[in-house]
Amino acid sequence: MIKGSFPIEKFKNFKTPFYYYDIELLRQTLSSVMNEANKYGYQIHYAIKANTNPKILSVINSYNLGADCVSGGEIQASINAGFSSDKIVYAGVGKSDWEIELGLERNIFCFNVESEAELEVINEIASKKNKIANIALRINPEVNANTHHYITTGLAENKFGISISALDEITENINNYKNIKLVGLHFHIGSQIMDMLSFKGLCVRVNEIQEKISEKKISIEHINLGGGLGIDYHHPNHIVMPDFKEYFSIFKKHLKLYPEQNVHFELGRSIVGQCGSLVSKVLYIKQGKSKKFAIVDAGFTELLRPALYQAYHRIENISSDEKEQEYDVVGPICESSDVFGKNIELNTTKRGDYIVFRSAGAYGEVMASQYNCRELPKSYFSDEMNY
């Protein structure tokens, strides 16, 4: 079993469970993203919901990305971290009035609008504030992303976005909203997408939609293609970041743009996913009738994805080099779903060993809870280990 490199001697100073971030890997990933995107003049917005740790946000902001937010709190967090408000896009199917007001007050770049009902409310609030709200219509392109049904967002029957069938009526009515300016179209087909053909399919559908809108003499300045690019949860030691070169080249090759159009992406998991790990300690080894349980001090309160999505995370015992045995790795939460993995091969494991859950930089710490009155996990960073 090939393991990641962790400063285990330093870990002895920290109370488990905690999050550990490899800042060098984060910087390498950001450099790769921006180098490839800049080849085509693409604009990148970091999807704040993937990880809102202030240090992580600060590092990402230093690479001149914009921010993709899905709540007023995320708008404020991105501004606090130094993101420029004119690079903030705000999506979300249920924007509250105060969140819309915050976006208008901060003069954010764009609201990604998900229904005509929302369009009416934004127009009304903008009118009261004597503002013009830039909006992009979020359209469901009806492209199957071939991912988990919980994180598929671009199909026709989905709480997110505007169906293609409703698009004609909305575009015909758009001029009735005097405090709205239509500047873009927004698409997002899902998350953790590994099949690049899904993105080719998205391009084909966007081209069709653009052609229909062009026939109505409606000018669109910005095309926002969302995110969704996945990471390799099974091989975090070998495949430390996605193939951004191939990803962006697909859009360059297959997306048909009109003159002066700008292209935007909203990447989250693919930027931060591999740089974060959840570090835990073994509390007990329990011998069952036909299997062994490694009971650790982390639970779904620190890493919810396995319980919520049945998601896989590579699990490593970084304290042991002994022969491998099979364990069910479980947490201490008083719920049967608090299971990280069954029949997991770990080097022979004992009480006090450090167990690491890899690829937890996205939707890990940010989804932590205090269920069972547990403390929220602390976080530590590779570039702060010189003490």
Image (cartoon, rainbow, N blue to C red):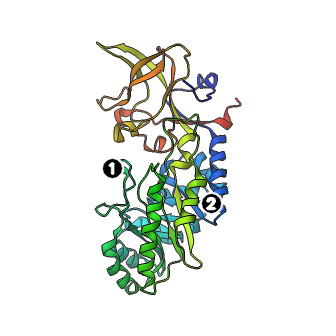
Relative to residue 317, is residue 59 depicted above or below? below
Residue 32 appears at what percent x and percent y? 65, 51
Number of numbered tags placed on the structure image: 2
CA–CA distance in space, label 2 to label 1: 29 Å
Q: Given the image, on which type of amino acid does mark 2 rest? A: Ala
Residue 175, by quadrant, is bottom left
Q: Is residue 79 visible?
A: no
Q: Given the image, on which type of amino acid does mark 1 rest? A: His
What residue is drawn where x is 47% and y is 59%?
Answer: 199
305 with respect to 378 (left or right) = left
- Pick the residue in front: 126 or 196: 196
What residue is drawn where x is 30% and y is 28%?
Answer: 334
Residue 384, by quadrant, is top right
Q: Are marks 2 and 1 in contact (CB under 8 Å)?
A: no
**Disc 2 residue crowd, few under 14, some 14–19, many 20+, Cα 10 Å:** many
Residue 346 appears at what percent x and percent y? 47, 20
373 with respect to 381 (left or right) = left
Residue to which mark 1 is pinned? 149
Relative to residue 48, is residue 344 depicted above or below? above
Q: Secondary structure at mark 1?
A: helix
As drawn, the label of residue 37 is 2
- Pick the residue in front: 336 or 251: 251
Looking at the rendered image, the quarter that the N terminus falls into is: top right
Relative to residue 80, is residue 278 depicted above or below? above
**Disc 1 residue crowd, few under 14, some 14–19, many 20+, Cα 10 Å:** few
Residue 336 appears at what percent x and percent y? 28, 29
Q: Is residue 143 visible?
A: yes
159 with respect to 123 (left or right) = left
